[in-house]
Image (cartoon, rainbow, N blue to C red):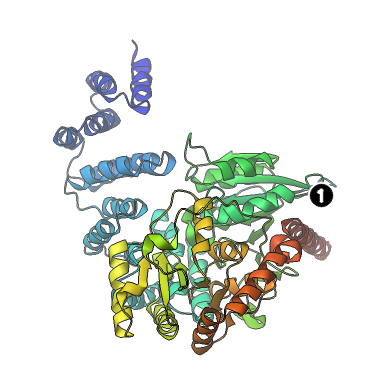
């Protein structure tokens, strides 16, 4: 077998998880080319995946000398291959094994530690994530990486949902670091470090409803981020003929994800004679089936599955001559931010997935009359585009049969059951105290708590607040997770009243509750995240439960708990709303979005004509 065939065969066996056979060929390759480091690196991986950790590390050490460049080259290899396993193949366990073995070489490399912490977080091992990230933080010198490592720690602390004193202290420190970075305006920073900056403000709306401060900071950071990226000349072809507008949707959430469940309906209802629809699936997991992604792809003229190469994604968008690019990720994913910052389409829009990113390259942010206050434009860099009724609508949700019942938890049939179903991120202690005051004021009531978080930590946290409010912990019940979304929706039926979170409301969870016709209580704030339930309730035809202060939140909670006739009235309102309300009319919503796209394109082409005339 010649050298090239040998190497190709070795890699093929490696990809097919035939590690002993691949190791044998990589040993032969190393004998033929002893100076080629990658042969030893892959041989080490083959040994690692057979459980031979020390042998793998010894094999890797052969290639590393005392120079920083040698160490960095090896670290980059480990990062690349761990991402391939973790992000493309959804094998977080293998990514963690690779990075743990690399960290075990005691290179004291911040990138290995940060990547290991990140994958611990992705695999929901949040305590390990925090431990490793804190170890990394001791080694970090530069501002961008200090901010990124703090972001990793904050992310896992919020997911745990119970250590709020530490969260608030770290958040204050993070704000100071971000302000310092904005003042310094760094240039020529490592592109990987820069690409992580924009996601570092992700925590802000969970802690405080202060859009004037938070949005201003976000906009300034977005400028630093975009200005620091290396320029990439992407030829953008303008649509000058009469062909249908090409609309591209970019996201890593167009799958079985809360965003995917909501966004799928716009694909179902697009007028494919007037619009050419493209979907760009980011961070797609190879060979993984997903019913929502497949549903969306079926309604697209073209769809693509990409990994994490932002440049490749941007080039494909430009090559496809997309006229309007719609981002559904915002700052939930750095790769999508980088794609948008490269400006591969003439008109760029953020919709649905999160509040706006503040990137100068994005032209519009989709909203409606309710989800942002009238004065909000003053703290947005994007032009707010308000649709006539609602910024999101669906036709329906799939629902199975309930798998939990009151008698399983020894809840009396005549009891009043409140439910709070959210992730740990949204469990702000001030909001939980309001919920406890409602429970305390309504006799024979229980609070059911459900959501992704550290269950024992969350339970201890709720019990501590309950006791401080004089409530027995036997009135708190913590529900288990379920297998499917349809089962989760059916199980909402156990509740009499849903208690929303603040300052970060529910979104998909709110729509699911309204679809199940369950009364809910929400507090309306100023920021986008604090007004989601407000716009959804208005667009479902109910105002009962909408509050504008802490006291109103408590009052509505008590009233809906004690007034059975009111609950029935809200139930029937929501039942009837399925026939007529904007929230449940995805076809009309899609027509509104299409009209917005046409107007955006007209504004763009008029501007281009005006510029051309000025240059004559």
Whole-percent x, y for residue 173 in the image: 32, 76
423 and 78: which is toward the camera = 423
Q: Going by the image, does 403 lie left or right of 60?
A: right
From the viewer's perspective, is residue 423 above or below residue 444? Answer: above
Residue at 28% x, 64% y: name it: 456
597 and 5: which is toward the camera = 597
From the viewer's perspective, is residue 99 above or below residue 374? Answer: above
Whole-percent x, y for residue 506 in the image: 52, 68
Helix, strand or loop at mark 1: loop
Residue at 31% x, 43% y: name it: 93
Q: Quadrant of the C terminus?
A: bottom right
Q: Which residue does the numbered mark 1 point to in the structure image?
A: 240
Whole-percent x, y for residue 353 in the image: 56, 60
317 and 289: which is toward the camera = 289
Residue at 48% x, 56% y: name it: 333
Q: Across the whole image, how many numbered discs are drawn on residues? A: 1
From the viewer's perspective, is residue 383 above or below residue 373? Answer: above
Q: Quadrant of the N terminus?
A: top left
Residue that lies at the very extreme toward the bottom in this rendered image:
551
From the viewer's perspective, is residue 338 above or below residue 528? Answer: above
Whole-percent x, y for residue 600 in the image: 75, 62
392 and 387: which is toward the camera = 392
Q: Going by the image, does 146 lie left or right of 88?
A: left
Residue 452 appears anywhere in the view:
no
């Amino acid at each position: 077998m010649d050298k090239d065939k040998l190497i190709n065969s070795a890699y093929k066996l490696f990809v097919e998880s035939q590690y002993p056979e691949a190791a044998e060929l990589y040993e032969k390759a190393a004998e033929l080319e002893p100076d080629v480091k990658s042969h030893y690196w892959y041989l080490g991986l083959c040994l690692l995946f057979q459980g031979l950790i020390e042998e793998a590390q010894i094999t890797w050490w052969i290639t590393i000398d005392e120079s920083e460049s040698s160490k960095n080259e090896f670290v980059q290899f480990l990062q690349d291959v761990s991402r391939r396993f973790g992000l493309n193949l959804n094998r977080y366990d293998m990514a963690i094994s690779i990075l743990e073995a690399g960290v075990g070489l005691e290179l004291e490399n911040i990138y290995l530690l940060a990547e290991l912490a990140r994958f611990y977080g992705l695999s929901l091992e949040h305590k390990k994530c925090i431990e490793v990230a804190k170890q990394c933080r001791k080694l970090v010198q530069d501002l961008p990486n200090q901010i990124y490592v703090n972001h990793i720690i904050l992310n896992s602390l919020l997911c745990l949902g119970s250590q709020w004193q530490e969260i608030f202290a770290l958040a204050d420190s993070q704000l100071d670091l971000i302000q310092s970075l904005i003042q310094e305006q760094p240039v020529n920073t490592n592109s990987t470090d820069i690409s992580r900056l924009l996601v570092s403000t992700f925590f802000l709306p969970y802690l405080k409803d202060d859009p004037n401060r938070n949005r201003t900071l976000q906009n300034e950071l977005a400028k630093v981020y975009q200005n620091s990226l290396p320029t990439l000349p992407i030829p953008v072809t303008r649509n000058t003929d009469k062909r249908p507008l090409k609309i591209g949707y970019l996201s890593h959430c167009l799958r079985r994800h809360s965003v995917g469940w909501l966004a799928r309906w716009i694909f179902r209802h697009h007028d494919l004679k007037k619009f050419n629809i493209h979907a760009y699936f980011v961070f797609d997991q190879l060979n993984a089936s997903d019913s929502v992604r497949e549903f969306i792809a079926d309604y697209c003229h073209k769809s693509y599955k990409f990994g994490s190469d932002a440049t490749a994604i941007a080039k494909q968008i430009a090559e496809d001559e997309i006229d309007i690019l719609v981002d559904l990720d915002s700052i939930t994913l750095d790769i999508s931010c980088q794609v948008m910052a490269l400006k591969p389409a003439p008109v760029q829009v953020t919709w649905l997935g999160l509040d706006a990113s503040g990137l100068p390259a994005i032209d519009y942010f989709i909203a409606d009359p309710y989800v942002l206050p009238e004065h909000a434009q003053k703290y947005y860099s994007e032009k707010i585009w308000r649709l006539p009724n609602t910024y999101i609508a669906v036709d329906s949700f799939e629902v199975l049969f309930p798998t939990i019942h009151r008698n399983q938890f020894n809840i009396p049939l005549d009891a009043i059951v409140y439910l709070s179903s959210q992730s740990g991120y949204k469990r702000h202690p001030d909001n939980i105290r309001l919920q406890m005051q409602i429970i305390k004021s309504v006799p024979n009531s229980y609070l059911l708590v459900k959501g992704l978080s550290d269950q024992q930590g969350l339970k201890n946290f709720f019990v501590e607040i309950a006791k401080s409010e004089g409530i027995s912990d036997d009135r708190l019940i913590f529900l288990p997770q379920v297998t499917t979304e349809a089962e989760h929706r059916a199980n909402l039926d156990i509740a009499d009243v849903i208690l929303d979170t603040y300052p970060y409301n529910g979104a998909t969870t709110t729509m699911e509750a309204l679809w199940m016709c369950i009364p809910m209580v929400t507090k309306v704030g100023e920021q986008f995240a604090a007004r989601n339930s407000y716009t959804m309730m208005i667009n479902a035809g109910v105002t009962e439960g909408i509050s504008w202060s802490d006291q109103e939140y408590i009052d509505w909670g008590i009233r809906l708990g004690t007034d059975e006739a009111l609950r029935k009235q809200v139930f029937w309102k929501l039942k009837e709303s399925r026939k007529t309300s904007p929230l449940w009319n995805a076809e009309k919503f899609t027509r509104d979005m299409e009209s917005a796209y046409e107007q955006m394109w007209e504004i763009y082409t008029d501007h281009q004509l005006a510029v051309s005339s000025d240059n004559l």
